[in-house]
Amino acid sequence: MNVEEIIKTQKKIPLPSRTLIHLMLVNNKIMERITGALKPYGVSPQQFNVLRILRGQGDRPANLSTLNDRMVSKMSNTTRLVDKLLAKGFVDRAICEANRRKVEITITAEGLAVLEKMDEVMRLTEADLVAGLSDTELIELNTLLDKI
């Protein structure tokens, strides 16, 4: 991916700026591919993330704060994400009996079933996105990204 070609500039971009622009372009490409892979299921990447978090909870419900803390993309509209998943039948929401101010969210059997289908599509999408990198290069890239 040539940054200068994509943003159509002849100017020499300072290396720190070029690097950040490059990361943003790569992020956009990744998000476009993930969004496209999830589109047939009517689920956004953020909704997919919520479903994965809930599955990881096992039998324990999660509250909105837990979901927001564990989300890859932090946002203030977690309630809206849960509402959309609730409307699709992928999650259940209940008032906590011990603390009536707390809302408990769990994934439904239907949510688990659709998540399993999405998992396979996501595995293929992820593999395709990093197909040009060896395992050693992926480890190195992760090490470098950890430094940012």
Image: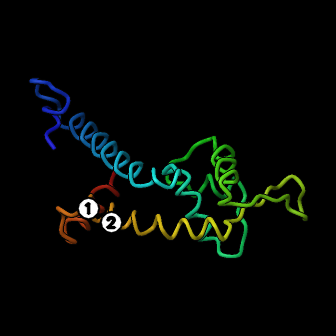
Q: Is residue 49 above or below residue 10?
A: below
Q: In this view, does 47 lie to the left or right of 39?
A: right
Secondary element at image label 1: helix
Q: Position of residue 80 (x, y in %)?
A: 66, 43
Give the quadrant of residue 57.
bottom right
Please give left or right for residue 119 compared with residue 126 in the image.
right
| Quarter where residue 147 is shown | bottom left
Rate crowding at label 2 as few (under 14), some (14 to 19) or many (20 or more) other CA atoms within 10 Å: few
Q: Is 132 drawn above or below residue 27 in the view shown? A: below
Residue indicated by mark 2 = 124
Instruction: Judge the density around disc 1: few (<14), some (14-19), many (≥20) Cα neighbours within 10 Å.
Output: few
Q: Position of residue 15 (x, y in %)?
A: 18, 37
Front residue of 115 and 79:
115
Q: What residue type is labelled 2?
A: Leu
Q: Which amino acid does label 1 sit on?
A: Asp
Q: Residue 128 carries which label?
A: 1
Pointer 2 and pointer 1: residues touching (CB < 8 Å)? yes
Query: Circle 2 — which element?
Result: helix
> Residue at position x 68%, y 58% from top?
89
Residue 45: image tag = none
